Image (cartoon, grey):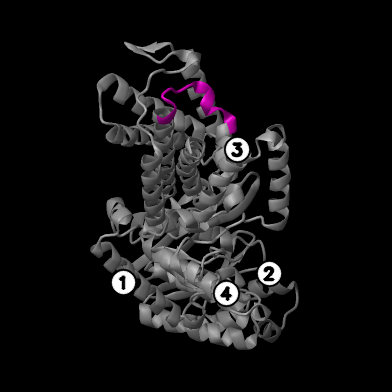
Amino acid sequence: MTASNEILSLRNLTVDFGGVRAVNDVSLSLQRGEMVALIGPNGAGKTTIFNLITSAVQPTAGEILLNGKSILRKSPDQICRLGISRTFQNIRLFPQMTAYENVELGLHSTPHYSLAEAFVRTPRARQIENDTRKKALELLEMVNLQEYAHARAASLPYGLQRRLEIARAMATSPQLLLLDEPAAGMNEDECNELIELIRKIHQQMQYTIIIIEHHMAVVMELCRDSRIYVLNLGSLLAVGSPQEIQNNPDVIRAYLGERKNARDFSAS
Amino acid sequence: MGYINAIIILAGINIIAALGVAILTGYTGLFSIGHAGFMALGGYFSAILVKEFGVHFVPALLAGGLFAGLTSFIIGYPAFRSRLRGDYFAIATLGFSEAIRLILNNTREIGFIKTGAAFGYMNIPGHTNLWVVIGAVVLAIYFAHMFVTSQYGKNCIAIGQDEVAAQMMGVDLLKTKLLALFISAFYAGVAGGLLGFYFAYLSPSFFTITKSSDLLAAVVFGGIQSLIGPVVTAFILIAVPEVLRALAEWRLIIYGFLFVVVMIYRPQGLFGYVEMNLHFARAWWQRLRRPVAER
């Protein structure tokens, strides 16, 4: 693996919230096209790491490099334009917009025509709007939401809202996609559908993906050929393949206290 | 006839200013109780251009709007940089507009221009008539509609619904909010200009917090994320008090009561989220044509 293939690198990231060290000296490196998972008990600092990468939170110490360049102290919208997009643990769709408008927003958050063209809506502007519309519908189709295109986002069932968030995140044409608990609150069938969906977009769009997830079945399945990072109390506890993680005594202790049977863990 | 004319003209001017507030408050979610200040700035500026420099009143109106829009950056830039939101931004706009009013109240002259302090700026040419106002209202509605349905306008709506998510999706908050504020102040400035050319004089006492809160009321009452709502209520809020002159002293009490009722039963406003477009008209028409039993 050459260094030029590295898309994201976190170097010794530390962040303090008042007296609490939420993230402690975390380093992580991602190659282009990889899909890795970030797991850990509640409060381990997983979402904080996403917030650091998207610049919603600034680190106390450490460095974040995207394609070899520091992205510290950029605003979240600049980060988005640099090619990092995310979903949220507690869904943050635009509730009063339709599913279609939610996706469309990601496509035109930097408008593609001038303000003057907006006021008179020139043929060029209308053409651009048509192209945007087509692209938004394609993305909705990709996550199987085409029949809900004109439903209000807030009125969609929970599982579909999660998928809509993924489509909206894809609309900003990211290189790096951060999925924060996409399977939260889903049953087994829905989880399987989601696994298929994530795998499909990973392959078709060639995204690099980091996924935070508590459903171990989902994590183990999605990362079976790659790595899992385990976070506990803000520090990296272990890195490794699903097998290694399942058999790692530290990880088992962090999750289950002192119980020893790894098989219980993998089934949870 | 003259009386009805007067009501329509004043209501039209109120509609234009309310459209400005609708873009800022109804769509972008930034509450302003200071639009009277922008009306004052635009009003005085365009009146001075016409009276002192002999500019034609149409370019003067636009220049007044532009002037109000540019001055809005004085309050907008620091407020948005420091992420003032909600009540805090509203208070900032209130402070700004009161400052404008008090400055005008204490300024007898700017150079050779006698702005007349609290007595008012007199002898402005009377260019505003019914047709000018109707034309201005039609254009104002048309351009407001064009804006809010454009990619720029949709970014404003996204900020109004979830600022954090909008920024994470790549919307430049500072630029987009400043744009919404600029357009909104432009509308208020043009409305202020029309007001001056109608009354033939301008007084700082036109532009008190009552004026600002009337405009905000039109938007909140008329409906969030709607243009037709503020247009209808801005008209009603001017016309109804005229019709019910006898109840003038009860006006604020009735307002307060209506607000409580609207907030309880329709928190999104009368026309909240209703866009002014043909789909809406068509749906209504079809609903009307259906037999009552099916509705």
The answer to whether residue A82 of the structure is visible from this angle is yes
> In the structure shown, which secondary structural element does the residue marked by tag 3 occupy?
helix
- Residue linked to disc 3: B242
Q: Is residue B207 magenta?
A: yes
- Residue linked to disc 1: A131
- Residue linked to disc 2: A254
Q: Are marks 1 and 4 in contact (CB under 8 Å)?
A: no
Q: Are marks 3 and 1 on the same chain?
A: no
Q: Is residue A66 magenta?
A: no
Residue at image location 48% in from the left, 21% down from the top: B203
Q: Are marks 4 and 3 on the same chain?
A: yes
Q: Compared to B84, does A11 lie above or below?
A: below
Q: Position of residue B70 (x, y in %)?
A: 36, 34
Q: Are marks 1 and 2 in contact (CB under 8 Å)?
A: no
How crowded pointer 4 is (Cα within 10 Å; few <14, some 14-19, many 20+) is rated as few
| Alpha carbon distance from label 1 to label 4 | 33 Å
Give whichever of B27, B54 is nearer the camera: B54
Q: Amino acid at mark 1?
A: Asp
